[in-house]
Image (spheres, rainbow, N blue to C red):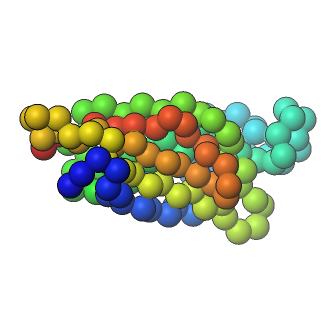
Amino acid sequence: MNTGDELFRNEYAIRRSDLVAYAHAGGDHNPIHLDDEAARAAGLPGVIAHGMYTMGLAARAVAEWAGTPDRITDLTARFAKPVVVPADGAATVIVVGTVRKIAESGDIDITMTVTCGSDKVLAPARATVTA
């Protein structure tokens, strides 16, 4: 494994039903995540995914690659653009992880590119996985 090597490329479909389930599980019932009219009134193009849901997908991609989530010792991201979820169909979030550096301990620093369409939705996004 070397700096710049691609470790994983995962695609996740997000549907409105996922946002409803996430709102119930997390207690975030902000209408911009559930109602087009409310989202547009807030200046958005339509219903958007919860930022933490999107970040959770990035964490899931790392955990799936690592084999277990307890190997993740650090995960950071900034919400760059919203993931707009259509009423019919799904938005597709793609998470690509590459080696940023490998520590002497064998821990791996990963840089993630997280996109929906042509937009980077999390930037920068990074994780550290123990050896």
Name the quarter where the C terminus is drawn.
top left
Q: As drawn, which residue projects farthest toward the front? A: 3
Q: Residue 128 or 55: which is nearer the viewer?
A: 128
Residue 12: tell me if it is visible.
Answer: yes
Q: Is residue 14 left or right of residue 6?
A: right
Q: Is residue 16 visible?
A: no
Give the left or right position of residue 46, taking residue 65 as reference. Answer: right
Displayed quadrant of residue 31:
top right
Coordinates of residue 6 in the picture (x, y in percent): 35, 58
Q: Is residue 76 left or right of residue 87?
A: left
Name the residue rendered at 21%, 40% in the picture. 102
Q: Residue at x 81, y 48 (%)?
A: 46
Q: Give coordinates of residue 104: x percent, y percent.
A: 11, 34
* Residue at x 50% of width, y 63% of height: 11
Q: Which quarter of the rendered picture does the N terminus lie within?
A: bottom left
Q: Percent x, y for residue 12?
A: 52, 61
* 68 horizontally vs 125: left or right: left
Q: Quadrant of residue 13?
A: bottom right
Residue lying at 76% horizontally and 67% vertically, measured from the top left: 88
Q: Position of residue 129 (x, y in %)?
A: 23, 41
